Image (tube, rainbow, N blue to C red):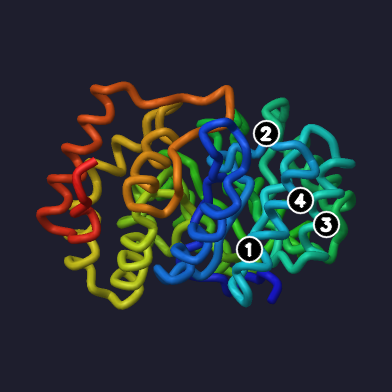
Amino acid sequence: MRLDESAKGVYVIAPTPFHDDGRIDEASTDRMTDFFLEAGCEGMTILGVMGEAPKLDQAESLAISRRIIKRAGEAKIIVGVSAPGFAAMRALARGSMEAGAAGVMIAPPSTLRTDDQITGYYAQAVQAIGTDVPFVLQDYPLLFQVQMTPGVIRRIVQDNPSCVMLKHEDWPGLEKISTLRGYTAEGSMRPISILCGNGGLFLDFEMERGADGAMTGYAFPDMLVDLVRLSAAGERDAAHDLFDAHLPLIRYEQQFGLGLAVRKYVLARRGIIGSAAQRAPGGKLGAKAVAEVEYLLARLGRTDARARLAPA
């Protein structure tokens, strides 16, 4: 099934599992895919920022996309196709869609500065990949250094019917969600799905502002599934209690340059992937950082059994 504006729930950002020597770990990829979907995720987003996409060559990107899409069955898989040039973007987008992807995600290049440059870029990207390919607009100004106002997002959505989802990662960004939902309520912007990133750091209130769910890669995506479910059901206190218990680890995982190392370490400790290795160049946790993560897991385990792991 193809992605559309009705998408809700958790679309977990998947890391790319590697062996210690840098080879793609196919067994861990399969196990990870099974775990994420059994945990209740509606789908997965692969080859995103935390998927180490720039470290893969074109053949590897397409191969891992095909493998996960096939393994996931009916679940929706979104493939990150951001690239310096449109030829590479088109090749991965078309190849992934032919393999059964639900849609693709496109981030803006950091060279864009004006509103017209931003909207013009997305018009060209849509022309390159094809107007029949549903796409996710990634808004992550802290990383990409591209500032998209709500008005610019509305222009992109209105000008490109194939834009069906916003990956919202602005910070602070709660007012942006409210403004976009206001546009839809007044009829000046067609409905789109809004899923939120930033490691889930603001997901408790983002859901209350009108987000449809999460698209992020926290090491406990099963918790994100529970949080989204509780929030959607109006169980506000239960949702915040769950979020509050995980917040120290979420915060620790949000460190720039270290976050993926933390995430992969915890996923490996949970037995979801075989190794915490990143493909070079990549970060690695030092002994003190490992001890701090283990301390956070132990504290979290007091209230959430999922964090009660066997000694490392």
Q: Residue at x 17, y 50 (%)?
A: 300
Numbered badge on residue 54: 2
Q: Which of the two labelled residues, at mark 2 and mark 3, occupies the earlier sequence position?
A: 2
Which residue matches tag 4?
Answer: 62
Q: CA distance from mark 4 to mark 3?
A: 7 Å
Q: Residues within 10 Å of mark 3 (few under 14, many from 20)?
A: some
For the residue marked with disc 1, what is the amino acid? Answer: Ile
Q: Which of the two labelled residues, at mark 4 and mark 2, occupies the earlier sequence position?
A: 2
| Disc 3 and disc 1 in contact, CB within 8 angstroms | no
Q: Quadrant of residue 95?
A: bottom right
Q: CA distance from mark 1 to mark 2?
A: 19 Å
| Disc 2 and disc 3 in contact, CB within 8 angstroms | no
| Disc 4 and disc 2 in contact, CB within 8 angstroms | no
Quadrant placement of the N terminus: bottom right
User: Where does the image place residue 158, in percent across and percent down from the top left?
Assistant: 73, 60
Q: Which of the two labelled residues, at mark 1 and mark 4, occupies the earlier sequence position?
A: 4
For the residue marked with disc 3, what is the amino acid? Answer: Gly
| Disc 4 and disc 3 in contact, CB within 8 angstroms | yes
Q: Residues within 10 Å of mark 1 (few under 14, many from 20)?
A: many
In the rendered image of this protein, does residue 152 appear above or below residue 261? below
